[in-house]
Amino acid sequence: MNIILETDRLYLREILPSDDEKMFEMDSDPEVYKFLGRKPIRDIDQSRKMIKNIIQQYKDNGIGRWAIIEKNSNNFIGWTGFKFEKEELNGNSNYYDLRFRLLRKYWGKGYITEATKAAIAYAFEKLDIKEICSMTLVSNEKSQQVLHKLGFSLTEKFTYQGDEITWYKRSR
């Protein structure tokens, strides 16, 4: 396993094609997708396509979403990390977008905060990224709480594809 980061309970590594079954398990769960503004995926090939896109981000931008691996079990439990967004959204382009997601059985254990805190430190210190953005549905209060814990500030709200969205930023 090519570990990028390590925390007390977790490893972060690049997402691999072999993560397709766990990605599918996570992304086909309606509860996981409840606050993502779209419907859960229905086919493992959608997970495989997503993984290919993430791997391309590593090649193109030197950064991407990272698998979160629980140390005790060595299980893939979700992902966190960044995507470099070139297309304009909400008046922003060429920004690093932070997102995170967990398999439902791992919710409420502080894993996202632990993993994402390490990922942010890595982005600022090792990759010299100056600013990170993140957005959530207005109704996704749990993710907003995580972003506040991680030092992000709500800068505005806007409508995107019919959904009310929060926009957060954190600078180095």
Image (spheres, rainbow, N blue to C red):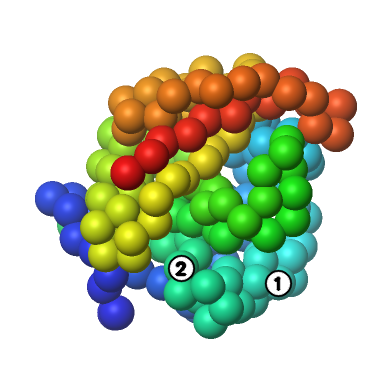
> Residue at the location (74% across, 65% down)?
46
Q: Position of residue 107 (x, y in %)?
A: 40, 34
Residue closer to the observer: 6 or 93: 93
> Residue at the location (32% across, 37% down)?
113
Taking 162 as reference, is 140 left or right? left
Residue 131: give its label: none
Question: N-terminal of the two: label 2 or label 1?
Answer: 1
| Residue sticking out furthest to the left | 8
| Residue 69 placement: quadrant | bottom left
| Residue 12 placement: quadrant | bottom left
Q: CA distance from mark 2 to mark 1?
A: 18 Å
- The residue wearing badge 1 is 49
Residue closer to the observer: 54 or 61: 61
Mark 1 residue crowding within 10 angstroms, few (<14) / some (14–19) / many (20+): few
The residue type indicated by label 1 comes to Lys
| Residue sticking out furthest to the right | 162
State the SS at label 1.
Answer: helix
Q: Position of residue 81 (x, y in %)?
A: 44, 54
- The residue wearing badge 2 is 63
Q: Quick one: quadrant of the N terminus?
A: bottom left
Residue 70 sits above or below residue 30 on the image: below
Q: Position of residue 97 (x, y in %)?
A: 55, 49
> Residue at the location (32% across, 32% down)?
150
